[in-house]
Image (spheres, rainbow, N blue to C red):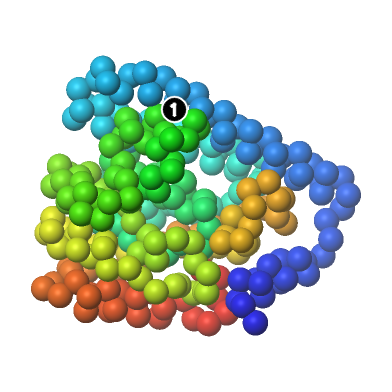
């Protein structure tokens, strides 16, 4: 049986919440979604207008910081309402580390929000479709995130980002995990790190809930609260052969999440 479904069934098997608490959590869930969407929109629209006017170096740093602050605000609302419990303190040790690749597993769509909320100089590899998003597109451009639609351009842009001192956040699986603990890793992130001479810092995300996993829709309420734990793993050098490194890193991640463990 798929382990993701096993975890989902495990959560559903918890004792039923009282009807009043269940009603509260449903209202709080949609309230938090509205806050997140409106917060993204509130920055994306002016960022689209400011993007051509602000010098690139200064604009990129400002854009990265504002996304961090916006995500931190949205997570604070989720925590204040009881929708989310997340221990992200381990990420604070990376705040001053320039020019590193941060490689994390990817159980849910919330992973990037959790990580970015603690890191003021981080750049993401983003789907090209997000650049046209009303809610995210302006902020993504302003922060100089890297598009993933052209492999050669993506590798060059990522290497340039690292050399400029920003951190590069990547999910080596390329998409949310379909077959826990992790799916097969792609090679491109190792090529980027090697091109920039950057170390790879691993981050391990544990999620107790299937919300926004591969097949979970945005508006479908999960059992609340959502609980996440983020911890730092080892830091690696890519070495001379990116493919050998990718296999080594994938094996490392698999060893961190024993069969049946959340991740």
Pointer 1: what residue? 44
Q: Is residue 181 visible?
A: yes
Residue 208 percent coordinates (x, y): 60, 64
- Image position of 150 with respect to 4: above or below: above
Picture residue at 46% right of the left edge, 46% below the top:
113
Picture residue at 49% right of the left edge, 30% below the top:
134
Q: Dividing the image into 4 quarters, which one contains the N terminus? A: bottom right
Residue 86 percent coordinates (x, y): 54, 52
Picture residue at 67% right of the left edge, 40% below the top:
81
Instruction: Judge left or right: residue 106 versus residue 81.
Output: left
Instruction: Judge left or right: residue 173 versus residue 210.
Output: left
Q: Is residue 100 visible?
A: no
Residue 204 percent coordinates (x, y): 41, 65
The image quadrant that residue 228 belongs to is bottom right
- Image position of 249 with respect to 90: above or below: below
Which of 53 and 33 lies nearest the eye of the viewer?
53
Residue 70 percent coordinates (x, y): 46, 33
Picture residue at 54% right of the left edge, 41% below the top:
75
Name the secondary structure under disc 1.
helix
The image quadrant that residue 242 belongs to is bottom left
Q: How many marks?
A: 1
- Image position of 251 with respect to 104: above or below: below
Q: Residue furthest front?
A: 150
Which of 176 and 36 lies nearest the eye of the viewer?
176
Which of 61 and 189 lies nearest the eye of the viewer?
189
Check disc 1: other Cα within 10 Å, few if <14, some if 14-19, many if 20+: many
Instruction: Judge left or right: residue 218 versus residue 132.
Output: right
């Amino acid at each position: 049986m798929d382990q993701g479904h096993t975890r989902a069934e495990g959560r559903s098997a918890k004792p039923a919440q009282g009807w009043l608490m269940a009603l509260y959590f449903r209202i709080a869930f949609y309230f938090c979604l509205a806050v997140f969407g409106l917060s993204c929109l509130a920055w994306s629209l002016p960022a689209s207008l400011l993007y051509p006017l602000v010098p690139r170096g200064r604009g990129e740093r400002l854009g990265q910081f504002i996304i961090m602050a916006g995500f931190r605000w949205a997570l604070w609302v989720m925590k204040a309402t009881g929708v989310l419990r997340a221990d992200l303190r381990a990420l604070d040790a990376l705040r001053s580390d320039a020019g590193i690749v941060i490689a994390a597993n990817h159980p849910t769509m919330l992973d990037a929000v959790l990580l970015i909320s603690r890191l003021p100089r981080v750049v993401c590899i983003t789907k090209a479709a997000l650049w046209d998003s009303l809610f995210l597109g302006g902020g993504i451009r302003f922060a100089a995130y890297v598009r993933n639609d052209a492999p050669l351009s993506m590798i060059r842009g990522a290497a340039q980002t690292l050399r400029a001192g920003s951190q590069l956040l990547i999910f080596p699986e390329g998409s949310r995990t379909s077959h826990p603990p992790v799916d097969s890793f792609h090679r491109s992130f190792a090529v980027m790190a090697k091109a920039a001479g950057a170390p790879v810092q691993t981050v391990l995300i544990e999620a107790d809930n299937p919300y926004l996993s591969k097949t979970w829709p945005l508006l479908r309420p999960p059992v609340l609260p959502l609980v996440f734990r983020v911890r730092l793993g080892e830091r690696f050098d890519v070495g001379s052969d990116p493919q050998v490194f990718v296999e080594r890193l994938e094996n490392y991640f698999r060893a961190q999440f024993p069969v049946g463990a959340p991740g």
